Structures are given as C-alpha cells and as structure tokens.
Amino acid sequence: MSFGQIAWLPLCAGITGVGLVLSFLLMRRRGAAAGLRAMGWSLLPIAAYLTGALPTLWQIGTAIVSFVAGLALNPMVWAGVGVAGLSVLLFLISGFLRGRRLRSAAPGSSGRSATPATPAVPASSAAPAAAATAGQGRASLPGATAPTQPLPKRTPREQAAPAPAPAARPAAARPAADDDFSDIEDILKRRGIG
C-alpha cells in the first residue's frame, strides 16, 4: 500500500477524536494532569496532517520497517550489528582505562603520586642537620641518615652557637597554635611546591 492510497484526513481526524474522548475519561478518572497529557498526544495526528509532515513520517516508517525486515533475514546486517557492538565495547573499555590512568597520575591520589612522600634533604645539609639533632637527643629528619664516620670536632664558638632548627617537622608533631600557616604549608607540599 502506498502513501497516496490512504485517506489521511478521515484517518487522522478519527484518531484525534477517539484520543480526545479517551483524554476526557482519563481526566475524570486520574486528574487534570494525566488528561491534559493524553489530550496533547491526541492532537498530534491531525497536526501532522495539517502541517504536511505525514509524507515524511511515512517515509521514515517504511525505511524502519524495511531495515528491520532486512535485519531479521540478512546475516551481513547481523555481522554489522556485532561489529558496531564491539566498537562500542572498545570505546567503553578505553574510557575506563584512561580514567584509571588519569586518577593514578593525579597528585594526592591513592596510587603512585608524582611527588615523593618524604622531602628530599640535600647531601650538603643532611650531615650537619643530623649531627645537630642527634647531639640534642631529637629525632633526625626524614630521609637523613646517621653519618658513618666520626664528625669533625666543633670549636668553642660553634659549640656556643645555638643549633639550627630542623628544616621541617612532621605535621603530627607540630602544635596547632604554633604555626598560623600550617594549612598553607600542607597545601603547598601536596602540590610539590614547598
């Protein structure tokens, strides 16, 4: 049956009329919202006829029906559907793997971080800092190792000078009121700046 063989005006007007009667019954039974929604759907067939959209809708419908009929009977089409499904699966897997890689590369993540966990102490300042802290009974800096050879003797002037304070103490050992900028220091350390 072709498009020109169908009497579209009586068909669209009949569908709209039946829809409006059912919309009225639905409005009385379920309320105004459900009835108005059904009335909106009921007016679409006559609107499609009056705007001239029916030939386009007819072509779309026949194309869908021929595609589905060809899909059900043609193994080449099923192979194409399988390849399209494989393509979608590969896109999903690659997106998942990329998201995992970006999460693990982000600083502060639970995986490997871009900045080392303990601050690196230069070799030139590691020995004096370790000697100063070991001489006063304090814990040594993170990453600083005890010297293997004896330390040089200090002159009386060096012994009278106060020992330099450690460069960084762990956040747990620092009192909260001691440093107003501890939050800023923590943020800078997490960013690898300080």
Image (tube, rainbow, N blue to C red):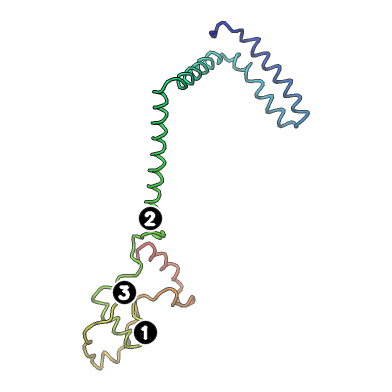
Q: In this view, does 92 lie above or below 116?
A: above
Indicate the secondary structure of the residue bearing disc 2: helix
Mark 3 or mark 2, earlier in chain: 2
Mark 1 or mark 2, earlier in chain: 2
Q: Where is residue 11 in the image (x, y as percent from the top left)?
A: 64, 12
Q: What residue type is labelled 1?
A: Arg
On-image quarter of the C terminus: bottom left
Could you give the CA–CA distance between mark 1 and mark 3, rounded to whole angstroms? 15 Å
The label on residue 143 is: 3
Indicate the secondary structure of the residue bearing disc 1: loop
Say left or right for 63 vs 120. Answer: right
On-image quarter of the N terminus: top right
Q: Which amino acid does label 3 sit on?
A: Gly
Q: Name the residue under label 2.
A: 104
Q: Is residue 141 above or below residue 94?
A: below
Q: Do the residues labelled 1 and 3 touch (CB within 8 Å)?
A: no
Mark 1 or mark 3, earlier in chain: 1
Say left or right for 49 vs 76. Answer: right
**Crowding near pointer 2: few (<14 within 10 Å), some, many (20+)?**
some
Q: Are marks 3 and 2 in contact (CB under 8 Å)?
A: no
Q: Position of residue 148 (x, y in %)?
A: 23, 83
Q: Nearer the viewer, residue 1 or 5?
A: 1
Q: In this view, does 32 lie above or below 112?
A: above
Could you give the CA–CA distance between mark 3 and mark 2, rounded to whole angstroms? 25 Å
**Crowding near pointer 3: few (<14 within 10 Å), some, many (20+)?**
few
Q: Which amino acid does label 2 sit on?
A: Ser
Q: Is residue 82 above or below residue 178?
A: above
Q: Which of 61 and 39 is in front in this view?
A: 61
Residue at 39 percent of width and 59 percent of height: 111
The label on residue 138 is: 1
The quarter of the displayed image where residue 86 is located: top left
